Image: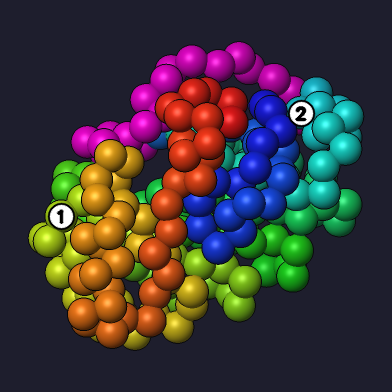
Amino acid sequence: MYPALQGEGIYIGIPMFFVRFTGCNLRCTWCDTKYAFYEGEEMEIDDIVKRIEKSGMKWICLTGGEPLIQKDIYKLIYRIMDEYKILIETNGSISIEDIPTEENIRISLDIKTPSSKMHHRMNFENLSYLGDGDFVKFVIMDEADFQYAKEIIEEYKIKREIVFQPVWGTDIKWLISRVMDEKLNVRVLPQLHKMIWGERRGV
């Protein structure tokens, strides 16, 4: 757990307190948090809440790994939802139906592209549960990913904010050019935290 600027998505640049959970049910080829597969320590909800309170932050980001595989994740959400703004970062493979639809809870929903090798694991029913402040994120590595994302947007007629994020180390200018050529109504955003601090943990 640590304070940092949000580095991705439509809430980029906002100071948040990050609660990073260990464990993930997917294995994306370009995952940049593989250490979260296994590392970490078991903590009681009361201890997590104390760390959150001590942080003094208004925004709390629940991330991973994959937070929705944690057995007590909803207990934590209900404990803090009345006092904080919450951003839940989830990989798109697990149902978000039970996440409370409160105005101060926001969802960052990944839709994995072919380069991740996990695109077949997506739960597209999740798109129907997204609210006004939620958004969808595609991590794009190449033309195949770009075309896949475009097809998904068209097939599911996604109404929420859409972010195209280049895989770290690939050319964002190429992605911007493709979005402009196709006149897509999406945001192209980098990983701000890596631009500032590089590939460090806890930022």
Q: How many marks?
A: 2
Q: Which residue is mark 2?
A: 48
Residue 68 image offset from top left, x and y in percent: 52, 44
Cα separation between marks 1 and 2: 39 Å
* Badge nearest the viewer, 1 or 2: 1
- Check residue 142 in the rendering and tell me which mark sits there, or answer none: 1
Which is more toward the observer, 189 or 104?
189
Q: Quadrant of residue 112?
A: bottom left
Residue 105 falls left or right of residue 176: right
Chief SS of the magenta region: loop
Q: Secondary structure at mark 2?
A: helix
Residue 45 covered by magenta stretch? yes
Residue 48 image offset from top left, x and y in percent: 76, 28
Q: Quadrant of the C terminus?
A: top right
Query: Residue at 49% across / 74% down in the picture?
Result: 161
Residue 66 covered by magenta stretch? no
Q: Amino acid at mark 2?
A: Ile
- Check residue 93 in the rendering and tell me which mark sits there, or answer none: none
Which is more toward the observer, 140 or 84?
140
Q: Which residue is outermost to the left?
A: 144
Residue 67 in sight here = no
Residue 194 in sight here = yes
Q: Is residue 116 above or below residue 181?
A: above
Residue 29 falls left or right of residue 172: left
Q: Amino acid at mark 1?
A: Asp
Q: Residues within 10 Å of mark 1 (few under 14, many from 20)?
A: some
Color theme of the render = rainbow
Query: Residue at 11% across / 60% down in the picture?
Result: 144
Image: magenta residue range: 25-46
Q: Secondary structure at mark 1?
A: loop
